[in-house]
Image (spheres, grey):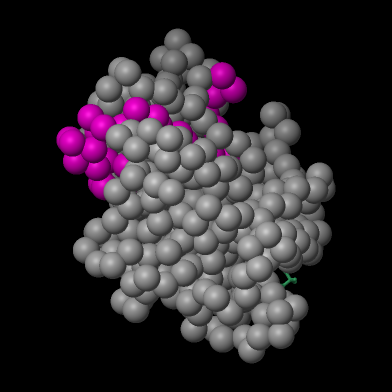
Protein backbone atom coordinates (compact mmCIF):
# COMPACT_ATOMS: atom_id res chain seq x y z
CA UNK A 1 0.00 0.00 0.00
CA UNK A 2 1.19 3.52 -0.86
CA UNK A 3 2.50 5.25 2.30
CA UNK A 4 1.00 8.69 2.81
CA UNK A 5 1.03 11.19 5.64
CA UNK A 6 2.54 14.43 6.86
CA UNK A 7 5.39 15.82 4.82
CA UNK A 8 5.44 19.13 6.72
CA UNK A 9 3.57 20.52 9.73
CA UNK A 10 3.75 23.91 11.45
CA UNK A 11 1.61 26.39 13.32
CA UNK A 12 0.91 30.11 13.56
CA UNK A 13 -0.37 31.82 16.68
CA UNK A 14 -1.31 35.46 17.25
CA UNK A 15 1.31 37.86 18.61
CA UNK A 16 -0.80 38.65 21.70
CA UNK A 17 -1.78 36.56 24.72
CA UNK A 18 -3.78 36.90 27.91
CA UNK A 19 -2.29 35.68 31.18
CA UNK A 20 -4.92 33.84 33.25
CA UNK A 21 -3.52 35.51 36.39
CA UNK A 22 -4.94 38.77 34.97
CA UNK A 23 -8.37 37.19 34.44
CA UNK A 24 -8.21 35.74 37.96
CA UNK A 25 -7.36 39.15 39.44
CA UNK A 26 -10.25 40.88 37.67
CA UNK A 27 -12.83 38.20 38.44
CA UNK A 28 -11.69 37.35 41.99
CA UNK A 29 -11.23 33.68 41.04
CA UNK A 30 -8.39 31.73 42.66
CA UNK A 31 -5.69 31.46 39.92
CA UNK A 32 -5.02 27.89 41.07
CA UNK A 33 -8.38 26.96 39.58
CA UNK A 34 -6.86 27.77 36.20
CA UNK A 35 -3.34 26.47 36.79
CA UNK A 36 -4.23 23.25 38.61
CA UNK A 37 -8.01 22.87 38.07
CA UNK A 38 -8.02 23.08 34.26
CA UNK A 39 -4.24 23.06 33.72
CA UNK A 40 -3.87 26.33 31.79
CA UNK A 41 -1.52 29.36 32.06
CA UNK A 42 -2.43 31.73 29.19
CA UNK A 43 -4.40 31.91 25.97
CA UNK A 44 -3.57 33.38 22.56
CA UNK A 45 -5.73 36.35 21.56
CA UNK A 46 -6.10 37.42 17.94
CA UNK A 47 -5.87 41.13 17.18
CA UNK A 48 -8.81 42.78 15.35
CA UNK A 49 -6.96 42.40 12.03
CA UNK A 50 -6.64 38.60 12.36
CA UNK A 51 -9.19 35.93 11.52
CA UNK A 52 -9.17 32.30 10.44
CA UNK A 53 -8.07 33.27 6.93
CA UNK A 54 -5.03 35.29 8.04
CA UNK A 55 -4.00 32.72 10.67
CA UNK A 56 -4.39 29.82 8.20
CA UNK A 57 -2.46 31.65 5.48
CA UNK A 58 0.36 32.61 7.86
CA UNK A 59 0.66 29.03 9.16
CA UNK A 60 0.88 27.68 5.59
CA UNK A 61 3.20 30.43 4.32
CA UNK A 62 5.73 29.55 7.05
CA UNK A 63 6.05 25.87 6.05
CA UNK A 64 5.72 25.96 2.26
CA UNK A 65 8.33 26.73 -0.38
CA UNK A 66 7.65 27.61 -4.04
CA UNK A 67 8.02 23.97 -5.15
CA UNK A 68 5.39 22.86 -2.61
CA UNK A 69 3.03 25.60 -3.77
CA UNK A 70 3.23 24.42 -7.38
CA UNK A 71 2.54 20.78 -6.35
CA UNK A 72 -0.58 21.54 -4.26
CA UNK A 73 -3.82 20.86 -6.11
CA UNK A 74 -6.19 20.78 -3.12
CA UNK A 75 -6.50 23.17 -0.19
CA UNK A 76 -8.85 22.46 2.70
CA UNK A 77 -9.47 24.70 5.69
CA UNK A 78 -11.10 23.13 8.74
CA UNK A 79 -12.74 25.72 10.98
CA UNK A 80 -15.77 26.51 13.09
CA UNK A 81 -15.03 30.26 13.07
CA UNK A 82 -16.01 30.78 9.42
CA UNK A 83 -16.18 34.31 8.05
CA UNK A 84 -18.80 33.66 5.36
CA UNK A 85 -21.77 31.31 4.96
CA UNK A 86 -21.01 30.67 1.29
CA UNK A 87 -17.49 31.48 0.11
CA UNK A 88 -14.99 29.25 1.85
CA UNK A 89 -12.00 30.58 3.77
CA UNK A 90 -9.91 28.15 1.67
CA UNK A 91 -10.53 30.25 -1.45
CA UNK A 92 -9.19 33.37 0.32
CA UNK A 93 -6.20 31.36 1.60
CA UNK A 94 -5.56 29.97 -1.89
CA UNK A 95 -5.35 33.55 -3.26
CA UNK A 96 -3.14 34.90 -0.46
CA UNK A 97 -0.67 32.03 -0.89
CA UNK A 98 -0.58 32.41 -4.66
CA UNK A 99 -1.46 28.77 -5.37
CA UNK A 100 -2.12 27.44 -8.86
CA UNK A 101 -5.57 28.20 -10.31
CA UNK A 102 -5.79 24.49 -11.22
CA UNK A 103 -6.65 23.66 -7.64
CA UNK A 104 -9.73 22.78 -5.58
CA UNK A 105 -10.46 24.71 -2.39
CA UNK A 106 -13.06 24.05 0.30
CA UNK A 107 -13.93 24.53 3.96
CA UNK A 108 -14.79 21.70 6.39
CA UNK A 109 -16.99 21.89 9.48
CA UNK A 110 -17.87 19.67 12.43
CA UNK A 111 -16.85 21.58 15.56
CA UNK A 112 -13.29 20.67 16.58
CA UNK A 113 -13.28 17.38 14.65
CA UNK A 114 -13.27 18.45 10.99
CA UNK A 115 -9.49 18.65 10.41
CA UNK A 116 -9.34 14.91 11.08
CA UNK A 117 -11.96 14.25 8.41
CA UNK A 118 -9.85 16.46 6.12
CA UNK A 119 -6.77 14.41 6.93
CA UNK A 120 -8.53 11.15 6.07
CA UNK A 121 -9.86 12.63 2.79
CA UNK A 122 -6.41 13.99 1.92
CA UNK A 123 -4.68 10.70 2.71
CA UNK A 124 -7.11 8.68 0.58
CA UNK A 125 -6.76 11.16 -2.29
CA UNK A 126 -2.95 11.13 -2.20
CA UNK A 127 -2.92 7.32 -1.97
CA UNK A 128 -4.81 7.30 -5.27
CA UNK A 129 -2.79 10.14 -6.87
CA UNK A 130 0.71 9.92 -5.31
CA UNK A 131 2.06 12.84 -7.38
CA UNK A 132 -0.49 15.24 -5.80
CA UNK A 133 -0.10 17.21 -2.56
CA UNK A 134 -2.86 18.49 -0.31
CA UNK A 135 -2.62 21.55 1.91
CA UNK A 136 -4.76 20.95 4.99
CA UNK A 137 -5.09 23.79 7.52
CA UNK A 138 -6.99 23.86 10.80
CA UNK A 139 -7.65 27.43 11.93
CA UNK A 140 -9.86 28.72 14.73
CA UNK A 141 -10.57 31.35 17.35
CA UNK A 142 -12.09 29.73 20.44
CA UNK A 143 -14.07 32.71 21.69
CA UNK A 144 -16.47 32.36 24.61
CA UNK A 145 -18.78 34.83 26.31
CA UNK A 146 -17.14 37.15 28.85
CA UNK A 147 -17.52 36.35 32.58
CA UNK A 148 -18.46 32.71 32.02
CA UNK A 149 -16.55 29.61 33.19
CA UNK A 150 -15.57 28.98 29.56
CA UNK A 151 -13.81 32.37 29.23
CA UNK A 152 -10.59 30.90 30.64
CA UNK A 153 -10.60 28.20 27.93
CA UNK A 154 -10.30 30.60 24.97
CA UNK A 155 -7.41 30.52 22.50
CA UNK A 156 -6.53 30.89 18.83
CA UNK A 157 -4.18 29.60 16.16
CA UNK A 158 -3.75 27.56 13.01
CA UNK A 159 -1.87 24.39 12.11
CA UNK A 160 -0.89 23.79 8.48
CA UNK A 161 -0.02 20.34 7.13
CA UNK A 162 1.29 19.28 3.75
CA UNK A 163 -0.14 15.81 3.10
CA UNK A 164 1.70 13.80 0.47
CA UNK A 165 3.24 10.50 -0.59
CA UNK A 166 6.59 11.75 0.80
CA UNK A 167 5.60 11.67 4.49
CA UNK A 168 8.89 12.87 5.98
CA UNK A 169 7.32 13.44 9.42
CA UNK A 170 4.70 10.74 9.92
CA UNK A 171 2.80 8.04 8.07
CA UNK A 172 -0.94 7.94 8.77
CA UNK A 173 -2.05 4.38 9.57
CA UNK A 174 -5.05 3.07 7.61
CA UNK A 175 -7.16 2.07 10.64
CA UNK A 176 -9.60 4.26 12.55
CA UNK A 177 -12.25 4.02 15.26
CA UNK A 178 -15.33 6.21 14.89
CA UNK A 179 -18.11 7.47 17.15
CA UNK A 180 -20.94 9.90 16.36
CA UNK A 181 -23.77 10.86 18.71
CA UNK A 182 -26.02 13.92 18.39
CA UNK A 183 -25.75 15.82 21.68
CA UNK A 184 -26.41 19.48 22.57
CA UNK A 185 -23.23 20.07 24.54
CA UNK A 186 -21.81 22.91 22.44
CA UNK A 187 -23.21 24.62 19.34
CA UNK A 188 -23.35 28.07 17.75
CA UNK A 189 -26.56 29.26 16.05
CA UNK A 190 -26.07 31.62 13.08
CA UNK A 191 -27.05 34.72 15.07
CA UNK A 192 -24.58 34.02 17.91
CA UNK A 193 -21.00 35.29 17.95
CA UNK A 194 -20.07 32.84 20.71
CA UNK A 195 -21.15 29.23 21.27
CA UNK A 196 -23.91 28.05 23.57
CA UNK A 197 -22.23 25.59 25.93
CA UNK A 198 -23.30 23.09 28.54
CA UNK A 199 -19.74 22.87 29.83
CA UNK A 200 -20.13 20.03 32.34
CA UNK A 201 -22.11 17.93 29.85
CA UNK A 202 -19.44 18.57 27.20
CA UNK A 203 -16.71 17.09 29.40
CA UNK A 204 -18.81 13.94 30.03
CA UNK A 205 -19.58 13.51 26.32
CA UNK A 206 -15.92 14.05 25.37
CA UNK A 207 -14.92 11.25 27.74
CA UNK A 208 -17.60 8.86 26.49
CA UNK A 209 -16.82 9.59 22.83
CA UNK A 210 -13.11 8.91 23.46
CA UNK A 211 -13.94 5.58 25.10
CA UNK A 212 -16.27 4.57 22.28
CA UNK A 213 -13.90 5.62 19.47
CA UNK A 214 -11.06 3.69 21.13
CA UNK A 215 -13.31 0.59 21.54
CA UNK A 216 -14.21 0.74 17.84
CA UNK A 217 -10.52 1.12 16.90
CA UNK A 218 -9.55 -1.79 19.14
CA UNK A 219 -12.37 -4.04 17.88
CA UNK A 220 -11.22 -3.55 14.30
CA UNK A 221 -7.45 -3.72 14.78
CA UNK A 222 -6.96 -5.91 17.85
CA UNK A 223 -4.56 -3.21 19.07
CA UNK A 224 -3.57 -2.92 22.71
CA UNK A 225 -3.73 0.48 24.44
CA UNK A 226 -0.06 -0.04 25.31
CA UNK A 227 1.00 -0.16 21.63
CA UNK A 228 1.64 3.61 21.52
CA UNK A 229 4.66 5.56 22.76
CA UNK A 230 2.81 8.89 22.94
CA UNK A 231 -0.87 9.88 22.97
CA UNK A 232 -2.31 13.13 21.59
CA UNK A 233 -5.79 14.32 22.55
CA UNK A 234 -8.05 17.10 21.39
CA UNK A 235 -7.19 19.77 23.96
CA UNK A 236 -9.88 22.22 25.08
CA UNK A 237 -7.65 22.51 28.19
CA UNK A 238 -4.92 20.18 29.34
CA UNK A 239 -6.76 18.66 32.33
CA UNK A 240 -9.33 17.21 29.92
CA UNK A 241 -6.62 15.09 28.27
CA UNK A 242 -5.20 13.97 31.61
CA UNK A 243 -8.60 12.80 32.85
CA UNK A 244 -9.42 11.06 29.58
CA UNK A 245 -6.06 9.32 29.43
CA UNK A 246 -6.44 8.20 33.05
CA UNK A 247 -9.86 6.76 32.24
CA UNK A 248 -8.66 4.95 29.10
CA UNK A 249 -5.69 3.53 31.03
CA UNK A 250 -8.10 2.23 33.72
CA UNK A 251 -10.46 0.77 31.07
CA UNK A 252 -7.51 -1.08 29.53
CA UNK A 253 -5.85 -2.26 32.74
CA UNK A 254 -2.79 -0.09 32.11
CA UNK A 255 -0.90 2.10 34.61
CA UNK A 256 -1.31 5.83 33.99
CA UNK A 257 1.98 7.38 32.83
CA UNK A 258 1.83 11.17 32.49
CA UNK A 259 5.05 11.22 30.44
CA UNK A 260 3.25 9.65 27.48
CA UNK A 261 0.93 12.68 27.17
CA UNK A 262 2.91 15.49 28.88
CA UNK A 263 4.90 16.72 25.86
CA UNK A 264 1.67 17.08 23.85
CA UNK A 265 0.18 19.53 26.34
CA UNK A 266 3.06 22.04 26.58
CA UNK A 267 1.87 24.37 23.81
CA UNK A 268 -1.81 24.08 24.74
CA UNK A 269 -1.16 25.32 28.29
CA UNK A 270 0.06 28.68 26.93
CA UNK A 271 -2.01 28.93 23.74
CA UNK A 272 -5.39 27.61 24.90
CA UNK A 273 -8.08 25.88 22.89
CA UNK A 274 -7.65 26.21 19.13
CA UNK A 275 -10.71 24.05 18.30
CA UNK A 276 -9.94 22.26 14.96
CA UNK A 277 -6.22 22.91 15.38
CA UNK A 278 -5.96 21.72 18.99
CA UNK A 279 -5.21 18.03 18.31
CA UNK A 280 -2.62 18.95 15.67
CA UNK A 281 -1.06 21.53 17.98
CA UNK A 282 -0.74 18.67 20.48
CA UNK A 283 1.03 16.70 17.75
CA UNK A 284 3.41 19.65 17.07
CA UNK A 285 4.02 19.93 20.81
CA UNK A 286 4.85 16.21 21.06
CA UNK A 287 7.16 16.31 18.03
CA UNK A 288 8.96 19.47 19.18
CA UNK A 289 9.55 18.21 22.72
CA UNK A 290 10.50 14.55 22.18
CA UNK A 291 13.46 13.17 20.29
CA UNK A 292 12.81 9.46 20.86
CA UNK A 293 9.90 8.79 18.53
CA UNK A 294 11.53 7.42 15.36
CA UNK A 295 9.49 4.44 14.10
CA UNK A 296 7.18 4.77 17.12
CA UNK A 297 3.37 4.91 17.04
CA UNK A 298 1.45 7.97 18.26
CA UNK A 299 -2.23 7.60 19.17
CA UNK A 300 -4.54 10.46 18.11
CA UNK A 301 -7.95 11.11 19.70
CA UNK A 302 -9.93 13.65 17.72
CA UNK A 303 -13.14 15.08 19.18
CA UNK A 304 -15.64 17.70 18.08
CA UNK A 305 -18.66 18.64 20.16
CA UNK A 306 -22.05 17.81 18.91
CA UNK A 307 -20.45 15.15 18.65
CA UNK A 308 -17.96 13.16 16.54
CA UNK A 309 -14.80 11.36 17.65
CA UNK A 310 -12.13 9.45 15.74
CA UNK A 311 -9.25 7.38 17.08
CA UNK A 312 -6.30 6.77 14.74
CA UNK A 313 -2.52 6.60 14.69
CA UNK A 314 0.63 7.94 13.08
CA UNK A 315 3.96 6.15 12.79
CA UNK A 316 6.87 8.54 12.93
CA UNK A 317 9.54 8.42 10.26
CA UNK A 318 13.27 8.04 10.66
CA UNK A 319 14.86 11.54 10.85
CA UNK A 320 11.43 13.16 11.37
CA UNK A 321 13.07 15.88 13.48
CA UNK A 322 14.86 17.26 10.42
CA UNK A 323 11.49 18.04 8.80
CA UNK A 324 10.10 20.01 11.78
CA UNK A 325 9.75 23.77 12.38
CA UNK A 326 10.48 23.58 16.12
CA UNK A 327 12.72 26.66 16.27
CA UNK A 328 10.20 28.77 14.39
CA UNK A 329 7.52 27.66 16.88
CA UNK A 330 9.67 28.46 19.93
CA UNK A 331 10.56 31.86 18.46
CA UNK A 332 6.89 32.75 17.95
CA UNK A 333 6.10 31.85 21.55
CA UNK A 334 9.13 33.69 22.94
CA UNK A 335 8.30 36.98 21.20
CA UNK A 336 4.61 37.25 22.15
CA UNK A 337 3.23 40.31 23.93
CA UNK A 338 1.08 40.08 27.06
CA UNK A 339 -2.15 42.08 26.74
CA UNK A 340 -3.30 44.26 29.62
CA UNK A 341 -6.79 43.36 30.85
CA UNK A 342 -8.17 46.57 29.28
CA UNK A 343 -6.59 45.75 25.90
CA UNK A 344 -7.95 42.19 26.14
CA UNK A 345 -11.45 43.61 26.65
CA UNK A 346 -11.01 45.93 23.64
CA UNK A 347 -9.75 43.12 21.41
CA UNK A 348 -12.56 40.83 22.56
CA UNK A 349 -15.26 43.34 21.67
CA UNK A 350 -13.62 44.54 18.45
CA UNK A 351 -14.39 41.44 16.37
CA UNK A 352 -15.92 41.27 12.93
CA UNK A 353 -16.59 37.68 11.89
CA UNK A 354 -18.84 37.66 8.89
CA UNK A 355 -20.32 41.16 9.03
CA UNK A 356 -21.18 43.08 5.86
CA UNK A 357 -20.78 46.60 7.28
CA UNK A 358 -17.92 48.74 6.00
CA UNK A 359 -15.00 49.04 8.38
CA UNK A 360 -11.30 49.93 8.26
CA UNK A 361 -9.07 48.06 10.72
CA UNK A 362 -5.79 49.32 12.20
CA UNK A 363 -2.60 47.27 11.83
CA UNK A 364 -1.69 45.19 14.92
CA UNK A 365 -0.90 41.69 13.64
CA UNK A 366 2.62 40.28 13.32
CA UNK A 367 1.34 37.68 10.85
CA UNK A 368 2.24 37.42 7.18
CA UNK A 369 -1.27 38.50 6.17
CA UNK A 370 -3.86 40.75 7.74
CA UNK A 371 -7.55 41.49 7.53
CA UNK A 372 -7.70 45.17 6.57
CA UNK A 373 -11.46 45.73 6.69
CA UNK A 374 -14.70 45.50 4.71
CA UNK A 375 -15.63 47.53 1.65
CA UNK A 376 -19.07 47.20 0.04
CA UNK A 377 -19.55 43.99 2.04
CA UNK A 378 -16.31 42.47 0.71
CA UNK A 379 -13.52 41.35 3.05
CA UNK A 380 -10.16 42.91 2.19
CA UNK A 381 -6.96 41.02 3.00
CA UNK A 382 -3.41 42.36 2.71
CA UNK A 383 -0.04 40.67 2.51
CA UNK A 384 2.59 41.93 5.00
CA UNK A 385 5.44 39.97 3.39
P1 LIG B 1 -16.12 25.51 35.76
O1 LIG B 1 -17.51 25.52 36.22
O2 LIG B 1 -15.37 26.75 35.85
O3 LIG B 1 -15.21 24.47 36.45
O4 LIG B 1 -16.14 24.96 34.26
P2 LIG B 1 -15.23 23.65 37.81
O5 LIG B 1 -15.87 24.39 38.91
O6 LIG B 1 -15.73 22.28 37.46
O7 LIG B 1 -13.67 23.62 38.06
C1 LIG B 1 -12.81 23.07 37.13
C2 LIG B 1 -11.78 22.23 37.90
O8 LIG B 1 -11.00 23.13 38.71
C3 LIG B 1 -12.42 21.23 38.87
O9 LIG B 1 -11.56 20.09 38.87
C4 LIG B 1 -12.30 21.92 40.22
O10 LIG B 1 -12.25 21.01 41.32
C5 LIG B 1 -10.97 22.64 40.04
P3 LIG B 1 -12.20 18.64 38.57
O11 LIG B 1 -13.25 18.41 39.58
O12 LIG B 1 -12.79 18.76 37.16
O13 LIG B 1 -11.03 17.73 38.64
N1 LIG B 1 -10.81 23.79 40.94
C6 LIG B 1 -9.66 24.09 41.56
N2 LIG B 1 -8.45 23.49 41.57
C7 LIG B 1 -7.46 24.07 42.33
N3 LIG B 1 -7.65 25.20 43.05
C8 LIG B 1 -8.84 25.82 43.08
C9 LIG B 1 -9.91 25.27 42.31
N4 LIG B 1 -11.21 25.64 42.10
C10 LIG B 1 -11.74 24.72 41.25
N5 LIG B 1 -9.01 26.94 43.82
C11 LIG B 1 -15.58 23.97 32.20
C12 LIG B 1 -15.14 24.20 33.62
C13 LIG B 1 -14.56 23.11 31.48
C14 LIG B 1 -16.94 23.26 32.19
C15 LIG B 1 -15.70 25.35 31.50
O14 LIG B 1 -14.42 25.94 31.41
C16 LIG B 1 -16.28 25.28 30.11
O15 LIG B 1 -17.51 25.27 29.94
N6 LIG B 1 -15.42 25.27 29.06
C17 LIG B 1 -15.87 25.21 27.66
C18 LIG B 1 -16.32 23.83 27.24
C19 LIG B 1 -15.18 22.85 27.19
O16 LIG B 1 -14.03 23.19 27.04
N7 LIG B 1 -15.51 21.54 27.25
C20 LIG B 1 -14.50 20.49 27.15
C21 LIG B 1 -15.01 19.23 26.49
S1 LIG B 1 -15.88 19.58 24.96
C22 LIG B 1 -14.62 19.89 23.79
O17 LIG B 1 -13.48 19.65 24.05
C23 LIG B 1 -15.04 20.48 22.47
C24 LIG B 1 -14.71 21.96 22.33
O18 LIG B 1 -13.35 22.12 22.05
C25 LIG B 1 -15.57 22.59 21.23
C26 LIG B 1 -15.67 21.92 19.87
O19 LIG B 1 -15.62 20.72 19.68
O20 LIG B 1 -15.89 22.69 18.92
C27 LIG B 1 -15.02 22.75 23.58
Quadrant location, ligand no. 1 = bottom right
Above or below, 246 relative to 235:
below
Quadrant location of residue 287? bottom left
Query: Left of 338 or right of it: where is 216?
Result: right
* Residue at the limit of the structure toward the bottom, as seen here: 255
Tell me which segment is drawn in magenta. Answer: 59-86
The total of numbered circles placed on residues is 0
Name the residue at the top extreme. Answer: 376
Drawn side of residue 169 relative to residue 358, left or right? left
- Residue 24 point in image, percent of width and height: 59, 70
Reply above or below: 135 against 168.
Answer: above
Image coordinates for residue 125, horizontal then vertical, percent: 45, 35
Residue at position x 25%, y 59% in the image: 323
Q: Which of these two is toward me, 136 or 267?
A: 136
Q: Who's the residue at 68% across and 59% down the image?
A: 220
Q: Establish if 126 lies above or below 181.
A: above
Answer whether residue 155 is visible to the viewer in this image: no
Residue at (70%, 38%) from the top-left corner? 188
* Residue 229 in view, yes or no: yes
Q: In the drawing, does residue 5 fall left or right of residue 166?
A: right
- Answer whether residue 169 is magenta in the image: no
The C terminus lies in which quarter of the figure? top left
From the viewer's side, name the closer residue of 184 and 303. Answer: 303
Q: Is residue 72 left or right of residue 306?
A: left
Name the residue at 39% across, 51% down: 3
Residue 300 horizontal/vertical position (percent): 55, 62
Residue 71 in the magenta stretch? The answer is: yes
Whole-percent x and y of residue 289?
35, 74
Amino acid sequence: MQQVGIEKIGFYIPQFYVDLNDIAKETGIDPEKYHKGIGQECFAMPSPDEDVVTMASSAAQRILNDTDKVAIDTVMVATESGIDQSKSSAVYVHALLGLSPNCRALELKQACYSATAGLRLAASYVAMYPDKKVLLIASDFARYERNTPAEATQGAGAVAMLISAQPKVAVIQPHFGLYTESVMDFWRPNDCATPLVDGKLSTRIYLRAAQEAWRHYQAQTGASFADFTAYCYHLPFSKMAIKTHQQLCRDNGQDFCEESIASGMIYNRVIGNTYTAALYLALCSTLDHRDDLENKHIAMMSYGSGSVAEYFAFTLQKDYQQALFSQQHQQMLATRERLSFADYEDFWHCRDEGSSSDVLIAHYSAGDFRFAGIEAGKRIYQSCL
